[in-house]
Amino acid sequence: MKKCAIIVYCLALIFGLSGLAVAVPTTWTDTIDWNPDKKISMWSGLSYTHDITDDPDGFESYFMGGNDIIDSYSLTLSIYDDGGRCDWFEIARIDQPGVIGDGFYNFSQTSENFGWSIAGVLSLNFTGMIDVTVSSWFGDFYLDSSELVARGDNGTAPVPEPATLLLLGTGLLGLVGIGRKKFNKKA
């Protein structure tokens, strides 16, 4: 009876330890702040790329493709009117990979969040980059800044598999059993 209790206790300990293996939630940020701000004229556009695989300052963690995983992201743009006399209203179209995250900028706000798209998440996971196009459908305006915030799991810390821990634990239990058997024979 005591042997059975020890075995059950050891198995519970092994499974309990395997439940502790989790990845670390991480946020990657890439900000583009144009100086001077980029003017976008009527019926023209500007394309640019956010890249979270590089870290120009050397202070933040950067995305490592094939190791890290991105679950979602948000794209926030800051655009303002050029104050021209002939402009009654401006229409700015924001285009990112896929269709879901596309939209029109609301000029009554100082910045606007454009969410995410499945194609954008795939692009970030495979390349660590996402292409964005801001185009003028009417009027002209200035593009001040663009910020990409990606959220996911940092895979740089190795996460042990539960099956590996189970195999290690059963091997240790086997060694304990052999040791007890030898100890009982000597006595």
Image (spheres, rainbow, N blue to C red):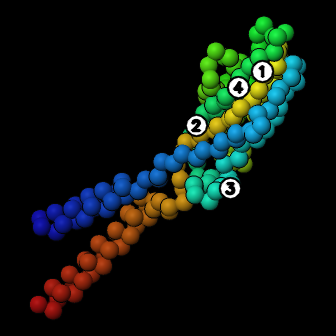
Upstream in the sequence, badge 2 or badge 3? 3
In front of the other: 97 or 29: 29
Q: Which amino acid, by three-letter code, is at mark 2?
A: Ser
Q: Which mark is residue 18?
A: none
Dot 3: within a 10 Å radius of its alpha carbon, few (fewer than 14), some, or many (20 or more) residues? Answer: few
Is label 2 in a helix, a strand or a loop?
A: strand
Is label 3 in a helix, a strand or a loop?
A: loop
Dot 2: within a 10 Å radius of its alpha carbon, few (fewer than 14), some, or many (20 or more) residues? Answer: some
Q: Nearer the viewer, mark 1 or mark 2?
A: 1
Residue 183, percent from left and from top: 18, 87
Give the alpha-carbon distance from disc 4 to disc 3, as whole Å.
24 Å
Q: Which amino acid, by three-letter code, is at mark 1?
A: Asp
Give the alpha-carbon distance from disc 1 to disc 2, as whole Å.
33 Å
Q: In this view, does 120 lie above or below 15?
A: above
Q: Is residue 138 above or below residue 14?
A: above
Q: Is residue 96 above or below residue 19?
A: above
Q: Mark 2 points at which residue?
A: 72
Give the alpha-carbon distance from disc 4 to disc 2, as whole Å.
23 Å
Q: Residue 56 carries which label?
A: 3
